[in-house]
Each structure stands twice: as C-alpha cells, then as structure tokens.
Amino acid sequence: ALRVARRARRPLRLAGGLAEGKYWDRRLAPRLDRERRYVGMVRYTDMPRFYGAASVLLNPLRWEEPFGLVMTEAMACGTPVVAFPHGSVREVVKPGVSGFIVKTIPEMVRAIPKAEALDRKKVRAHVEAHFSIERMVLGYEQVYEAVIRKSAKRKT
C-alpha cells in the first residue's frame, strides 16, 4: 500500500494493529512521511467516519485471507476497494461496481482513479445486497430449509 500510494502520489492512512519488529522498523517505518502515515487502531465507533472519508481502500493482500471484513466495512461506507485477487476478494469485490481486482502494483495505481469514479451509493448497495445481516440470515434459512427437505425425502 505504501508503494502504491507513493507511485500514485496520494496520501495514505495505514490503520490497524502494529506488528512490531525488524520488518516494521526496517521496511515500513522509513517509508512513512507526512502524506503516508500510520494512524494506529481505529475505534469501532470511528470506523464509519474513517472509511467514509477515504476515496479508496487499498487491500494489497498477499495471502489467502478467508474473508475480508475490512473490505465489506469500507464498502458499507460507500468506499470502493482495490485489491489483489487473493482469499475472498473475488467473492467480495464486484469489479466496476464496488471496486477493482488487480494483479500488480502498477495496475493498482491505475485502478485508483477508476475506483474513485465509481458511484458510492452503488458500492454501498452492493454490500447491502450481498453481505448484510438480512442477507446472511436469508442464506442460513435457505441452507436449513434444504437440509430439512433432504431429511424429509429420506424418511419417505
């Protein structure tokens, strides 16, 4: 994310838990400056304002994260996501609607202005349609009903 922000000549706010150690001290901390800085953990009550103020969420995952909660949180605030295609990214991000899926740092840089041009109301609508509590409950109900139907067929 730091490389992308620097290449795109954009500010960056890194948030979250800090992994202490040599990697942070040697690789990340020296790259921070006035425009690209670490803001620490964001309180739950401050997340809507934090995400909502962002033009884009950069999510340069390099591992197979099972579910990207940070992506749905950002999209719930209308903030589009630009991410590498690892983990659940393909299930969460709808290209051209809620963000973009890219493979390289240069592609991520080029995707930023495209993501900023997306309709933030449509970004929010995407997450509501696919990841809301109501959608989750409906999904569970459908699974339970299928199990009940299958069980009833076995008994007959």
Image (cartoon, rainbow, N blue to C red):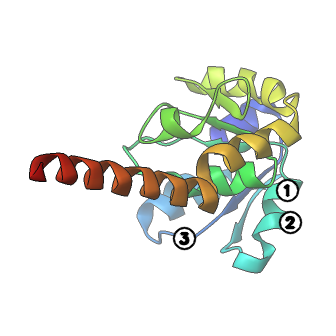
**C-alpha distance separating marks 3 and 2:** 21 Å
Which mark sits nearer the N-terminus, 3 or 1? Answer: 3
Task: Compare residues 102 and 92 and report the one nearer the observer.
Answer: 92
Q: Is residue 93 left or right of residue 21?
A: right
What is the crowding at mark 3: few (fewer than 14 residues within 10 Å), some, or many (at least 20)?
few
Image coords of residue 5 (percent x, y)? 74, 39
Sequence-earlier tag: 3 or 2: 3
Q: Residue furthest left?
A: 155
Q: CA distance from mark 3 to mark 1?
A: 22 Å
Q: What element does badge 3 sit on?
A: loop
Q: Residue at x 64, y 52 (%)?
A: 72
**Front-lying residue, 141 or 156:** 156
How many numbered marks does the figure carry? 3
Identity, as a three-letter code, of the amino acid under mark 1? Gly
Question: Observer-nearest residue: 41 or 49?
Answer: 49
Residue that label 2 marks = 49
Amino acid identity at mark 3: Leu
Q: Which residue is mark 3?
A: 18
Q: Give the percent coordinates (x, y) of residue 14.
A: 68, 58
Image spot of residue 36 (x, y percent): 77, 52
* Residue drawn at point x = 12 percent, y = 48 percent: 156
Residue 52, label in figure: 1
Q: CA distance from mark 2 to mark 1?
A: 5 Å
Amino acid under disc 2 = Arg
Q: Is residue 15 above or below residue 119?
A: below
Question: Label for residue 111?
Answer: none
